[in-house]
Image (tube, helix red, strand yellow):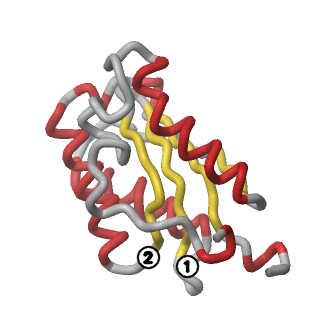
Amino acid sequence: MNLAPQEIRSYFVTTVAANRRRLFQVDANAQLMLDVLQHYRTQGKFALHAFVIMPDHVHVLLTPAPDVSLEKAVQFIKGGFSFRLKSKRDVWERSYNEVQMLEREKFQACMKYIEENPVKAGLCAAVGEYLYSSARMTDGIDPMPRHFR
């Protein structure tokens, strides 16, 4: 199936806590981020294909809903978390990094990178052991988008 580039709307997104603060090292904060991801996924704002909540950053592989821009999807995640956290300090770095997934192989490589990230960082011994990763929490994860199947 040949799709125009604007129809391929899956992205690997990384967002970092302000000053690389280890915000998500606190279980309550990591759980709050997990709740935010699932809340907006359930609302249909985006499909969530993979994620990992690292101590100072978050990686997600997502496909925004047809009526939601990537910028808005990231705003839901970052803004939704910040609002619920109610911190008086800055929560996030202003920007985020994104890579558009144009090929099935790249999508799969990013998914693997996300799942292996806690192992490479020495936070666990094997994929699937880290508490705040889609490799462990397979409920609430959406399948690969149709345009890659």
Q: Is residue 148 above or below residue 96?
A: below
Residue pointed to by mark 1: 68
List x then y, in percent, for residue 58.
44, 40
List x then y, in percent, for residue 94.
56, 44
Residue 1 figure quarter: bottom right
Furthest residue to the left?
Answer: 28
Where disc 2 sits, the SS reads loop
Question: Mark 2: which amino acid?
Answer: Lys
List x then y, in percent, for residue 14.
55, 43
Furthest residue to the front?
Answer: 149
Q: Residue at x 78, y 76 (%)?
A: 6
Where disc 1 sits, the SS reads loop
Judging depth in this view, the residue of 57 and 125 nearest the camera is: 125
* Crowd tier of the residue under label 2, counting other residues whose Cα lies within 10 Å: few below 14, some 14–19, many 20 or above: many
List x then y, in percent, for residue 108.
62, 49
Furthest residue to the top?
Answer: 122
Q: Which mark is residue 45?
A: 2
Tell whether 122 sits left or right of 73. left
Tell whether 106 sits left or right of 66. right
* Crowd tier of the residue under label 1, counting other residues whose Cα lies within 10 Å: few below 14, some 14–19, many 20 or above: some
Judging depth in this view, the residue of 22 and 136 nearest the camera is: 136
- Separation of marks 2 and 1 at Cα, in angstroms: 7 Å
Question: Mark 1: which amino acid?
Answer: Val
Furthest residue to the bottom?
Answer: 67
Judging depth in this view, the residue of 122 and 78 nearest the camera is: 122
Tell whether 104 sits left or right of 3. left
Q: Residue at x 40, y 28 (%)?
A: 56
Q: Is residue 121 visible?
A: yes
Q: Residue at x 27, y 68 (%)?
A: 39
Label 2 with label 1: CB-CB less than 8 Å: yes
Q: Is residue 71 above or below residue 146?
A: above
